[in-house]
Image (tube, rainbow, N blue to C red):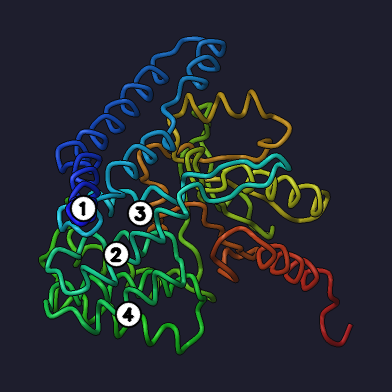
Amino acid sequence: MQPLRRLFPLLLLTLSQAWAGTPGEALQIQKEFTLANETWELKLKVATSEDAQRELWKQRPVLSDYAKRMWSCLKPSLAEEWSLEPASWLIRVAPSVVETKDDGTTVQGMKEAVEAIRKSVEGVHLMSPKLSPMCLALSAGGDPQSLALLEKIDAKNPDPKVQGVAALGQAIVLKGLGDEADVIRKRLTLLRKAIINSASEEIGGISVSSIAEDELYIIRYLTKGRVAPELEGVDSGNRPMKLSDYKGKVVVLLFWGSNMPEAERTLEFCASLEQKFAGKPFALVGVNNDPVATLRGMQVRDAGRIAWPNFSDPGGQVAQQFRIGARPVMYVLDGERKIHFFGAPGSFVELTVSALLAEKKAPAPGN
């Protein structure tokens, strides 16, 4: 029996190695998703009829399929340093992978994977010099657990460049906590460290200095109390539109796309805003980054919910003026385009709109 007992752990190790993925397999999954998505978007652009567009919409590559394949590839290999780069890809796309339950509610489809990757980073890779892509990926979802991990990487990783990218990631996550003075001060300190330590680092072809400059721009020009930039563009029918067309109204400006996390829930929230504030000096205005044919198709299929005007912005030029990264993001503007809120769709948006509309009704002092 003793020889068999000694052989059992060796057998388990051999089987786990056989099941483990490889760097080549992980890279192939990423390439397949990119190619499938680009091919689908190209077909959609050249579709000549609404029927063809509707049919193509059903054939859209399913991100969750690729994410689950990637997780199967990475799960046995999280202790290996090569897994960090593809795990960063999985962390970035995970917020867009949602599953609908029988009661109609949605849940994050890759929650187990995200938690396991975070644990492996903290327990195995905390001192790795290859953590920079992971640091930026962790900032994508605005998760408080990711913020805690970024703080640990910043404090314990010996590489100053990794520390700088971890500081940048913290500054991005903190953006979701609001515009209070202490939060702004902390973000500025972190962005300064990112620029000093890691300005020349490039992640996904984008330099840390470029990302940090965008974050500084947001602090200076896109925080509460600032006047939002004018936006000019066209809608899905190529008709010109401007943000200033809605002067005098309380505006909820939504940056969105059909492949963003919680897309369905966001559209339902928009429908509830439209219904609640109907007949009041209020406007919901979208900036959509789908191909124009995709936006047009959604407006045809779901005209009851997407009746509000949308800038068609597949190239991202309009969104760039607000330095938009992950979607959805909502800005609440008063009648003079002054910013009163920015963040995710939710109750704070509705409360801010209600307060601004109440101010418009209130009589002037002395009247």
Report the residue marked by disc 4.
Answer: 151
Of the image marks 2 and 1, the number of the one nearer the N terminus: 1
Side of 159 relative to 325 (left or right): left
Image vertical order of residue 299 relative to residue 309, above or below:
above
In front: 56, or 151? 151
Tell me the CA gap for discs 4 and 1.
Answer: 21 Å
In front: 300, or 30? 30
Report the residue marked by disc 3.
Answer: 91
Contact, mark 2 vs mark 1 (Cβ under 8 Å): yes
Report the residue marked by disc 1.
Answer: 83
Taking the spot 79% from the left edge, 54% from the top edge, the residue there is 277
Taking the spot 36% from the left edge, 45% from the top edge, the residue there is 317
Of the image marks 2 and 4, the number of the one nearer the N terminus: 2
The amino acid type of the residue labelled 1 equals Ser
Q: Report helix, strand or loop for mark 2.
A: helix
Q: Nearer the viewer, mark 2 or mark 4?
A: 2
The amino acid type of the residue labelled 2 equals Ser
Q: Report helix, strand or loop for mark 3.
A: helix
